[in-house]
Image: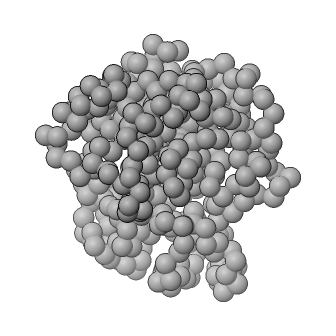
Amino acid sequence: MKQRIDGQAIVYCEGAFNTPNGKTAHGLVRFTERYEVVALIDPKYAGQDTGEVLDGKKNGITAFASFEEAYNQAIEAGKQPTHFVIGLAPDGGRLPKEAKAVIKEALKRGLHIDSGLHDFLTNDPQLVELAKSHNCEIRDVRKTPDRDKLHFFTGDIERVKCLKIAVLGTDSAIGKRTTSWLLVHGMRNAGYKAEMVGTGQTAWMQGAKYSMIMDSCINDFVSGEIEHAVVSAWRLEKPHLIVIEGQGSLMNPAYPGGFEILAAGRPDYVVLQHAPKRMEYDGFPGYRLHSIQEQINAIKVISGKDVIAITLNHEDMTEAEILPACDAITQETGLPCYDVLKYGVTELIELLIEKL
């Protein structure tokens, strides 16, 4: 059995798998060092391999219609579940009402609960009591630490001497985290030391050792927490490369992430994730997605740093459209464009190695 930080997990993603609202589950079935994912719950894809659904490549993790089916199948396979993980990532981070009943089932089976939503399960007395009576722990990953545990910006970021890359995006839910992990793994496979600085709950759930959760952090401490994570990764690991996961996008009306990452993480360069088929910001009809060139210009104006490559999100594209789309972006921006999820990171890793 694979060794993981915390154990074996069933991921709950009912009604959201293979949609933008299931991005936490997507990350977990693609890669996590925190758990061994043994099953996923979403009736829409019951019986199907989750990797085949997402990426056309089997990963051995099956979707089930219910918690009972997922749990029993894991037991039969000799993989006793230890954790029940909320894999939903809806707009606003709110927990669907129907999920509470499934969480109660998991607690009664003795499973620990991990949630990255803004609805804190530890604020529900009934769930807390149920967890206590079954010797379970509930972790609300997005719950802000006490202020005395938070860090303020100090300027220590200037002591970091390795290459720092920020993976930003032209929109939210566009694949920044997945690309960040692919770069980290690609550098490691090439013989270099690389660390991921996670800035969202899913990166933490995937086992990012150095991370903070940007969208629930008290504003005064966001820059300091980003800096602290980057500096800690440098001091403790001495990597050749630190990859900082982006959040939202600079001009997304609801998730204007990226400002603090540029200001506090002080990356040397930016890799920009883009989905050519998107015309409007995710979840906000009528809000035109700013062009890729506008977004590149904004990054340069804000940070003085260059975007060195575009990474393509091929959503709503046929395979035949992908490489021509990359060529078109290169023609428009003058920058190399890669679909790293479809075709791998080799060429982009070569570009990063040149920057070391």
Q: Quadrant of residue 155?
A: top right
Q: Pinpoint residue 302: horizontal percent, then vertical percent.
A: 59, 32
Q: Quadrant of residue 93?
A: bottom right
Q: Residue at x 30, y 35 (%)?
A: 339
Q: Point out the residue furthest to the left here.
A: 320
Q: Residue at x 56, y 36 (%)?
A: 244
Task: Decide: is 195 above or below 31.
Answer: above
Q: Pinpoint residue 335: horizontal percent, then vertical percent.
A: 35, 23
Front residue of this view, candidates 354 and 196: 354
Q: Residue at x 57, y 62 (%)?
A: 116
Left or right, 50 with reference to 135: left
Task: Decide: is 119 above or below 255.
Answer: below
Front residue of this view, candidates 220 and 232: 220
Task: Decide: is 304 above or below 61.
Answer: above
Q: Is residue 224 visible?
A: yes
Q: Pinpoint residue 62: horizontal percent, then vertical percent.
A: 31, 63
Q: Residue at x 73, y 23 (%)?
A: 158
